[in-house]
Amino acid sequence: MIYEQTLLKIIEPIKRTTINRMNKGKKWKYGYNKEHDIVVISKTGQIGEIYEIQNLRIGLPLEPKGVYVHPKKKWVKFEQPKELTRLKNIFDWKNYPDESKEQWYDYIDEEFKRREEGFWFNNNGKSTYITGTHYMYLQWSKIDVGAPDFREANRLFYIFWEACKADKRCYGMCYLKNRRSGFSFMSSAETVNLATISSDSRYGILSKTGADAKKMFTDKVVPISINYPFFFKPIQDGMDRPKSELAYRVPASKFTRKKITSNEKLEDIQGLDTTIDWKNTGDNSYDGEKLNLLVHDESGKWERPDNILNNWRVTKTCLRLGSRIVGKCMMGSTSNALDKGGDNFKKLYNASDVTKRNRNGQTKSGLYSLFIPMEWNYEGFIDEYGIPVFTTPDSDVLAPDGELIDIGVIDNWQNEADGLKDDQDALNEFYRQFPRTTEHAFRDETKNSIFNLIKIYEQIDYNEEMSRTLGISTGNFQWVNGIKDTQVIFYPDPKGRFKVSWVPRVELQNKIILKNGIKYPGNEHMGAFGCDSYDISGTVDGQGSKGALHGLTKFSMEDAPANSFFLEYLSRPPTAEIFFEDVLMALVFYGMPILAENNKPRLLYYLRRRGYRGFSMNRPDKIWNKLSIAEKEIGGIPNSSEDIKQAHAAAIEMYIQNHVGIKQDGSFGDLYFNDLLNDWSRFDINKRTKFDATISSGLAIMANNKHLYTPNPKIEKPKLDLHIAKYSNKGNISKIIKK
């Protein structure tokens, strides 16, 4: 199978003539460009390629005429001139002979320029741009293995981060990563990079525990700071290797050529209060303090009572002054199991989707989510040019350490995953550590589900692998010519509210039977819908549960898949009436009935009012005479009965066993809606209201198997009373024996 990467797209959303015109006048400003909806990270006034990374459109600088080419045509760290290595700080420079200083001014200026604007180099014949932050990481940051390798994954990471910094609407990034991706070192390098050119600023570090934050500070931040060259390194207060706070007195921004050549005395330079420190893990860490940068390491591993969501609500305010964002957050983590902090991190990650913004242009969290699949950054499968070896090569590929790579990362990953299939918890842990999709990253432990997670995850993995061939259409239904109660058609729309995997042939569409002025479904023998409705259009928090609708076929003699979920709807339109009409149109188009919960009855009253009472199924566990007045009027099934709750869960359990994952014949099930599968995996029968998809799908299964719930009352034969009197014949007169 040919691998197609989806992380990076090079797009052309702006006319080339517009770009050229703006470039000529150097009019592209660093930051968000509202007119063209791109984030410009160029500081030269000119832009070149436009990247789209996780739906964020980023304008890179224009490639210069002279691109640096190393003899090896790859990134190689520049050797610092030996004469300058002897200079440890600005005091040493002040005492350096003036005649010797002159030869280094251009060198120092160039380093400052690269730090500010970024750097271009030839990488295996291709001109490649790295941001200033990335340059500082590669050239001047000391990590555990010495100097970092260039990796394409890190290049894209830093480009995305630069866009987060440039965009005034953004509070930073929420990065979902794989294990050993280098985030701790990269964020530490950025902390030192920013702190050493800032004045009166505060930089903070948080991790899953205070001990972890301290270790990141002492083992990563401090060594990087110590190993900076003198012209980037401020004068440091206190200990050489502090344990809790790194304080800078004179920032490196003072050491530009202009300042270096001035006659200003060192003692005349004002002492400036710029610090880097760490805090213990807690909801109120850094509460009330103004931060320029907050590094949030291992934020997906905060366990109770610590809550990353609560902490972010508090620390977010440390990064703003009124409506103005003055600091950024660099958040990154793998995910724990959902009940061990992973669930909160998942909520935060999902709330950081750049495609979902409020009227201020901000995401719900204020952060921008980034996920780099493991195949981009897996040690041992990156070539000497920093490019991932995705697929198995025809001939061995050279790695940076001189080893040969003879297998592609995806094949290697799959082999390891296959070896763990008999141990689902071990497999899920492997997925969380080395995820290829966000669903891998948020895999839960099997013990936390009432359903068979092994089969659910088998199906999810299959769906992800075959995603391009499943044939799911997104779209909406509408009445022909906009005339209600006529014919319904389905039209594709990438932003549609419905996902559909099958539609009946034309002669079976819109099949309705009319009896006594009431419309009935003409395809009840083919399948049914289940629905979890809602009654109120708006909610206090503006969220609320989604309306959920699922369509499921059953075995029939028609040309239709059997026992197959063919439709999914998980949405909350602006008004409840839009949702009701969406449901009605789906029912009409497919000609199938619906079983819905009647504790939220507005949908069922809506159907009745429109003449579609015949589409609303009655609860299958009671005969007509035992239904309440309301149930006779609108149909539906209550959700309050414990028996119904158990029957509902048992119905889903039965379906999963028979039709999900690897079936007895070795084939895979045809349930292609991963949102539903994930909802099943998390389902808690004691908190049913949170699982809209599970409720609606379970009702669809019950609707198609209503015979299982039909009451079977014991037939008791009435005693036959012939009214034959019995007499006492004692004495001379017969007397009736009274009962």
Image (spheres, rainbow, N blue to C red):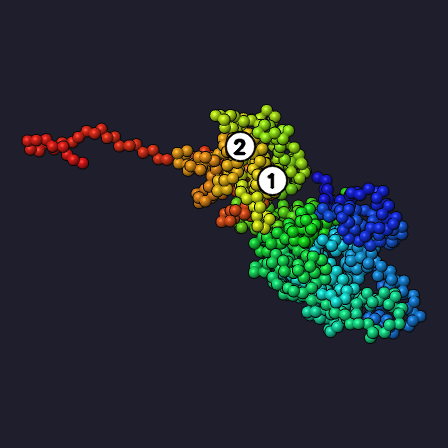
Front residue (pair 248, 170): 170
On residue 610, which mark appears? Answer: 2
Front residue (pair 715, 474): 474
How far from the left and from the top, in percent, is residue 31?
77, 53
Give the CA distance from mark 1 to mark 2. 30 Å
Q: Is residue 708 visible?
A: no
Write down the residue under mark 1: 673
On residue 138, which mark appears? Answer: none
In terms of sequence position, does the residue under pointer 1 or pointer 2 come before the other? 2
Q: Residue at x 53, y 42 (%)?
A: 535
Front residue (pair 406, 623): 623
**Label 2 neighbourhood size at 10 Å, few (<14), some (14-19), many (20+)?**
some
Relative side of 477 to 452, left or right: right
How far from the left and from the top, in percent, is residue 386?
78, 51
Q: What residue type is labelled 1?
A: Phe
Q: Which amino acid does label 2 sit on?
A: Arg
Q: Residue at x 57, y 48 (%)?
A: 539
